[in-house]
Image (cartoon, rainbow, N blue to C red):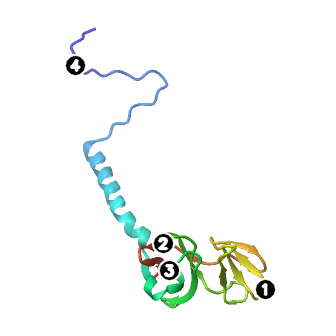
Amino acid sequence: MSNCGCSRRVSPPPGAPAPVQVSRRGFLGTLGALLLAAAAWPRRARAGKKWVAVPLAKAPKLRQAGGSMVTRIRGKELLLVRDGESSAHAFEAKCPHELCDLNYAPESQKIECPCHAGLFDLTGKVLEGPPPRPLETYPAIVDGDRILLNLPG
């Protein structure tokens, strides 16, 4: 056996899968497709949704944790809840049972429907009562002096 450092082909052991050989063109084509997909992904993830800012100057009830308010944005009636310094939530403002107005109870951190004792947590999940489904929720964050909501369309 020579120790010259030159390469030589070695056969794989019996039963081992054959090594896959990829051409330079195939490798570059796959790499290009992956880069294109990676560049397009953020746009697809945001497609159909837009961030909307609610200035805290125009929403005094949301300036402090525990505050809530109902507002109409883009034709949707929303219940906005601020449950922490940097934490906020946005929900449809009507109960899915019989479309009664919802209220936020800061002491229990629950959303209440006064019509038939419906109760929801801050993820929109039904905890008690007759509501047939969870609340529609929308991503929301506190960003300095505003709350940002991610709404469809």
Query: Is residue 27 among the parts visible in the rendering?
Result: yes
Q: Which residue is mark 3?
A: 63
- Mark toward the viewer: 4 or 2: 2
Q: Earlier in the sequence, mark 3 or mark 2?
A: 3
Q: Is residue 79 visible?
A: no
Q: Secondary structure at mark 2?
A: strand
Q: Nearer the viewer, residue 149 or 30?
A: 149
**Which residue: 33% across, 51% down?**
30
Q: Which mark is residue 141?
A: 2
- For marks 4 and 2, the one nearer the N-term is 4
SS state under label 1: loop
Q: Is residue 18 above or below residue 77?
A: above
Q: Amino acid at mark 1?
A: His
Mark 2 or 1 closer to N-term? 1
Q: Which numbered disc, 2 or 1, marks the residue closer to the eye?
A: 2
Using a 10 Å C-alpha cutoff, classify the residue at mark 1 as few (fewer than 14 neighbours), some (14 to 19) or many (20 or more).
Answer: some
